[in-house]
Amino acid sequence: MRHAPGTLTVLALLLSLSSAATAKDTPQEVQLWAYATTTGVVAPHWAVTLMPGLRWEVWDSEGEAGQATMVELFAGPSFVQKWGAVTLKIPLWYYYMGFPIRKPGPDDWFDSHNLELIPIVEYRLGRWTFTSRSILHNKVYARNTVFRSDAQRRGYSLLWRQLFQAAYTVAAGVDVVLAEELFLGLVEDGETNGLAKGEPFFEKHGLSMNRVYAGVSLTLPHGMSLSPQYVFETHHDPDHGTEVTKMRHYLLVTWSTTVQLFSR
């Protein structure tokens, strides 16, 4: 417990830095973000996960709020291997992203289809758990206001998301979590790379987003857990280096359930 004040100091510093950044004249949004994760362990090294998600706008710079901005669905298998204090996880998931449109009409729903390979390495050291998570986000379809033909919608781009996380156990079943995640475009779609970017479009080369996570993770009975976190997200224009184009503040809540589906 004597290390907890130092962890809280780092948390306070991150929050103060994000508050200072928001003083700039940059569009901002506040959203609620929730996931409900169900994982079935089907073999000693294999699991299958289903994870729906929802983002709900609370406030934005244009004063429009009170509606869903994005629905998500992840589904797929994961390979897990442990060597003492080190754990390797490799999920391969299908990822659906749906975007309700503010003004319903003929095109009142946009979406994208993606495949994600997610190598994760965890290392436990006493009360600390250090995690490196790399997401190779492969977008293969994007439907929006700009792409008018099937040839434009059926393309390919690759985004690399790199997260580093530190979790400290302050009490039984209670971890304080801090994380940093960068979004870097590696492959642009050849058909649409001169058109708009963002979601649901194909990715552009360079830095597109950065996220800072701060919160807690609570281990509950019967294979359940709850993790509320604050997320500070900055959007960057890949064509202009690190220029910030938008800021978002999230309350992210993840509810997880793990079910053992095989007998040892």
Image (spheres, rainbow, N blue to C red):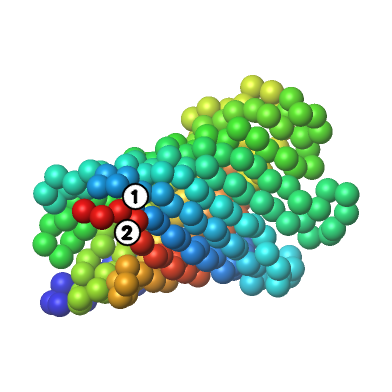
Return the residue nearer the eye: 181 or 67: 67
Q: Residue at the location (68% across, 29% down)?
A: 154
Whole-percent x and y of residue 242? 51, 43
Q: Does the image show residue 87?
A: yes
Whole-percent x and y of residue 26? 61, 59
Tag 2 near tag 1, CB within 8 Å: no
**Amino acid at dot 1:** Val
Q: Residue at the location (31% across, 65% down)?
A: 177
Please tell me in which quadrant of the rendered image residue 240 appears: top right
Q: Does the image show residue 242?
A: no
Q: Is residue 32 above or below residue 190?
A: below
Q: Identify the residue under disc 2.
A: 260
Q: Quadrant of the N terminus?
A: bottom left
Q: Is label 1 in a helix, a strand or a loop?
A: strand
Identity of the residue furthest to the front in this view: 263
Q: Identify the residue under disc 1.
A: 42
Q: Is label 2 in a helix, a strand or a loop?
A: strand
